[in-house]
Amino acid sequence: MSENSQPSYLGEMLKSQTNVYAFLTSVATGVVLSIPFGLGMALVPLVVFAAGEAIAALYVPSLPHFRAKVDKSYRDQARKNARWQLQDEIRKRTESRKMHIGSLEAYNRMVERVESLYRFARDNSARLSLRDVERLDDSTLDYLGIWLAALVIDDRAEVVSLTDVERRIRELDHEIEQGGLGTDVRQLQKARSEYQSLTVRHRRMLSRRRSIEAAMLSMPDQMEEIYQSIISAPSAGGLDSRLEESIARLRLEEDIEAELASDLGEALPSFGSRTVASAAPVRPVPLRQGKSG
């Protein structure tokens, strides 16, 4: 679910398992009653169901607990879709090159820790909320997002040779200096400017790659610290503040987030609003701020 979209709570109520079962029960009851009493009596359970449905439609979609349940379902589905897209794109880009085993192991370890915290939160909801764990789960998508961004940068780096570009700039400098009959100096200067811009963009991209490498190394360790902090001292005071501070450390710098969003937008045009650190993810997405039930 994107930041701006809203689920149809009425539609979710109508599609809920409880509501479907109630409808099927009404139909079955009507069929049973129609055998001894005829078709008229068979309609009574359906009329009662319709009346109850109308009353429920006035109240259920506005109930905070129901809305929270629907919102969580939408967030879970959006996270699942984003994870599949990112993993599929990473798989495609690593098929023709050496697999980043270390990156995959680090990601799997982060996912294992988050799954363990989900179980812990279900058993200790007073100490740790599921929404807090969701925010940590978002960081696993962020990790996939920066991993994909690193692969995108690697693909670009293979296309451009700085040595070749710098050689062409020197050749253009020589042609501009020599001039000669029929030489269009303005076009040569324009070409030189384009090559210089390409050089600047390429070096900036490689610098961004260094930032991504640092983030990919630090995020799994930070996740491990959060996990150990929660599991080792679940009854310690100030868990909310410690968790908030820890999640804040997982966030990427804003300038890196903006660059990654651009890279992932090119790699996954259909990824929608969930980019890295939009989360992200993608923070492919900063991590969600605030705490809800």
Image (cartoon, helix red, strand yellow):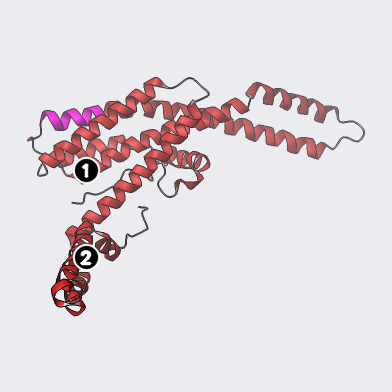
Residue designated by label 1? 132
Side of 272 relative to 9 (left or right): right
Q: Is residue 265 above or below residue 229?
A: below
Residue 170 position in % (x across, y down): 74, 24
Side of 293 relative to 73 (left or right): left
| Image-quadrant location for residue 11 | bottom left
Residue extending farthest to the bottom is 40
Q: What is the CA distance from the residue labelled 1 to the residue labelled 2?
A: 36 Å
Q: Which residue is pictured at 45% across the width and 26% down the height?
A: 210
Residue designated by label 2? 23
Give the crowd class for mark 1: few <14, some 14-19, many >=20 residues within 10 Å.
many
Residue 224 position in % (x across, y down): 24, 27
Q: Which residue is pictured at 74% across the width and 38% down the height?
A: 190
Q: Which residue is pictured at 28% across the width and 39% down the height?
A: 137
Does the magenta run of residues contain 234? yes
Q: Secondary structure at mark 1?
A: helix
Q: Which residue is pictured at 72% across the width and 27% down the height?
A: 169
Residue 20 visible to the viewer: yes
Q: Main secondary structure of the magenta part?
A: helix
Q: Amino acid at mark 1?
A: Asp
Residue 286 visible to the viewer: no
Residue 254 position in % (x across, y down): 40, 41
| Image-quadrant location for residue 106 | top left
Magenta-colored span: 224-236
Q: Amino acid at mark 2?
A: Phe
Does the magenta run of residues contain 282? no
